[in-house]
């Protein structure tokens, strides 16, 4: 199986977005995202791609999943199905699912690692991350951070590994 992981920031109520936008600005989360994903393939739906402040994200292979056969986006690798994504994924290094909600739900059953930024607040949203079932996942790393002048919410970086 190819190494596929999910990276996402979620609120206490599993909110991840509203109106195709992120719900918060946490500079350390953005730095972590960049550090973890640079040099890798990142897989996203078309709405997520168009929500990015800079497109395509530099120093990564941007894979865009769309159900519009033949659609092309400059400087991106296009995928038209779940199986296309799997075939495009690198067999030798981690591949990252970066959103949105539907893409997370599609791939959650097969990924081995979740890189979660847990934002310790509740938000109104229209997109939510699926519940992380403790029967299937074990938190292997947790780093807690607190409100400061650049971060208006307490948050934690949590890495989960799928239980065998």
Image (spheres, grey):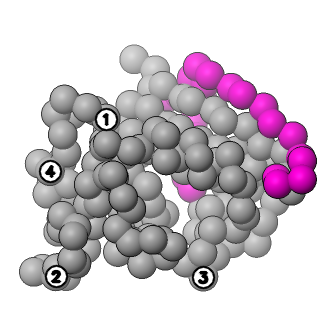
Image quarter of residue 32:
top right
**Which residue is drawn at the image coordinates 46% and 38% (left, top)?**
36
From mark 1 to mark 3, how far is it between C-alphas? 29 Å
Q: Earlier in the sequence, mark 1 or mark 3?
A: 3
- Which labelled disc corresponds to residue 88? 4
- Which labelled disc corresponds to residue 94? 1
Q: Give percent across and percent down for residue 155.
A: 77, 43
- Which labelled disc corresponds to residue 71? 2
The reply to whether residue 33 is in sight is yes
Q: Give percent across and percent down for residue 113.
A: 44, 32
From mark 2 to mark 4, how far is it between C-alphas? 16 Å
Range drawn in magenta? 129-151
Q: Give percent across and percent down for residue 34.
A: 49, 47
**Which residue is drawn at the image coordinates 33% and 52% (left, top)?**
59
Task: Examine the structure image and report whether residue 34 is included in the region drawn in magenta.
Answer: no
Q: Can you say whether 161 is above or below 125 in the image? A: above
> For the residue labelled by badge 4, is the local secondary structure a helix, a strand or a loop?
helix
Label 3 crowd bin: few (<14), some (14–19), many (20+), radius 10 Å: few
Image quarter of residue 142:
top right
Q: Earlier in the sequence, mark 4 or mark 1?
A: 4
Task: Examine the structure image and report whether residue 138 is included in the region drawn in magenta.
Answer: yes
Q: Earlier in the sequence, mark 1 or mark 2?
A: 2
Q: Is 21 situated left or right of 41 in this image? A: right
Q: Can you say whether 81 is above or below 108 in the image? A: below
The chief SS type of the magenta part is loop
> For the residue labelled by badge 2, is the local secondary structure a helix, a strand or a loop?
loop
Does the CB distance between marks 2 and 4 fall below 8 Å?
Answer: no
The reply to whether residue 103 is in sight is no
- Which labelled disc corresponds to residue 19? 3
From mark 4 to mark 3, how far is it between C-alphas? 29 Å
Label 2 crowd bin: few (<14), some (14–19), many (20+), radius 10 Å: few
């Amino acid at each position: 199986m190819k190494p596929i992981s999910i990276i996402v920031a979620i609120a206490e109520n599993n909110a991840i977005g509203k109106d195709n936008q992120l719900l918060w600005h946490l500079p350390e989360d953005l730095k972590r995202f960049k550090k973890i994903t640079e040099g890798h393939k990142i897989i996203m739906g078309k709405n997520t791609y168009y929500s990015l402040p800079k497109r395509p994200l530099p120093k990564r292979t941007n894979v865009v999943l769309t159900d519009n056969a033949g659609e092309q986006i400059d400087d991106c690798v296009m995928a038209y199905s779940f199986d296309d994504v799997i075939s495009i994924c690198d067999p030798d290094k981690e591949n990252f699912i970066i959103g949105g909600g539907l893409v997370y739900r599609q791939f959650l059953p097969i990924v081995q690692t979740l890189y979660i930024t847990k934002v310790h607040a509740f938000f109104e949203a229209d997109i939510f991350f699926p519940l992380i079932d403790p029967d299937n996942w074990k938190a292997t790393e947790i780093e807690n951070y607190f409100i400061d002048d650049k971060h208006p919410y307490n948050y934690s970086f949590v890495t989960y590994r799928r239980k065998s």
